[in-house]
């Protein structure tokens, strides 16, 4: 089962501990495998903040996305297989919790122009794609020559540009 929430800015304007009123996802939250949102603050709302079964997370970032929600990622560490972040132009770094995502296979981040380094990456990762990257990130992880290349050398499909 999947859920897409977009164009609902009023959902994120209230206090972070309020639930998403009127959302008809009762009974399926525990089964949710795909989540597609356009505002990262939605992950701090009930019932989304308590979900532990999401395999695929897609976030449209924009100015609101300065950090990925580390606590939420840790709640889904066993299930999460794919993270896609669109417009990560304000994302400053990836959380240290990335190393704990033991099922993560694919990480794709577009417009990652502020991220200068990567945290430890789980050994399960087989696909890493980042575009419009900061020059330090590109230099550090340049194939076979970058000083940090060895951190990602075992990943089958890498594209950092």
Image: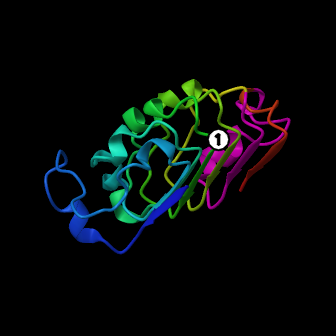
Q: Percent x, y for residue 120?
A: 60, 26
Q: Percent x, y for residue 150?
A: 77, 27
Identify the image quadrant of the C terminus. bottom right
- Residue drawn where x is 35% and y is 52% of the image: 26
Task: Say if the magenta span includes residue 131.
Answer: yes
4 horizontally vs 104: left or right: left
Residue at image mark 1: 81
- Residue drawn where x is 83% and y is 41% of the image: 143
Looking at the picture, the colour scheme in use is rainbow
Residue 87 visible here: yes
160 horizontally vs 77: left or right: right
Does residue 39 sit above or below 122 in this rendering?
A: below
Of 46 and 67, the residue lying toward us: 46
Find the magenta span and give its range.
124-150
113 horizontally vs 143: left or right: left
Q: Percent x, y for residue 67?
A: 39, 45
- Report the residue that reaches farthest toward the left: 15
- Residue drawn where x is 55% and y is 24% of the image: 100
Does residue 97 sit above or below 67 in this rendering?
A: above
Of 107 and 27, the residue lying toward us: 27
Task: Say if the magenta span includes residue 151.
Answer: no
Q: Label 1: few (<14), some or many (≥20) within 10 Å? A: many
Residue 88 visible here: no
């Amino acid at each position: 089962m999947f859920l897409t929430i977009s164009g609902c800015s009023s959902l994120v304007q209230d206090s972070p501990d309020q639930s998403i009123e009127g959302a008809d996802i009762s009974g399926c939250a525990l089964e949710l495998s795909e989540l597609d949102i356009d505002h990262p603050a939605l992950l701090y709302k009930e019932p989304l903040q308590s979900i532990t079964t999401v395999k695929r997370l897609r976030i449209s970032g924009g100015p609101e996305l300065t950090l990925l929600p580390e606590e939420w990622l840790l709640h889904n560490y066993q299930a999460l297989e794919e993270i896609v972040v669109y417009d990560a132009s304000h994302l400053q770094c990836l959380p240290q919790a990335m190393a704990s995502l033991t099922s993560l296979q694919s990480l794709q981040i577009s417009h990652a122009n502020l991220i200068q380094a990567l945290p430890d990456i789980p050994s399960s990762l087989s696909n890493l794609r980042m575009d419009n990257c900061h020059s330090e990130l590109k230099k550090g992880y340049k194939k076979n020559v970058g000083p940090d290349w060895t951190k990602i050398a075992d990943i089958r499909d890498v594209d950092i540009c």
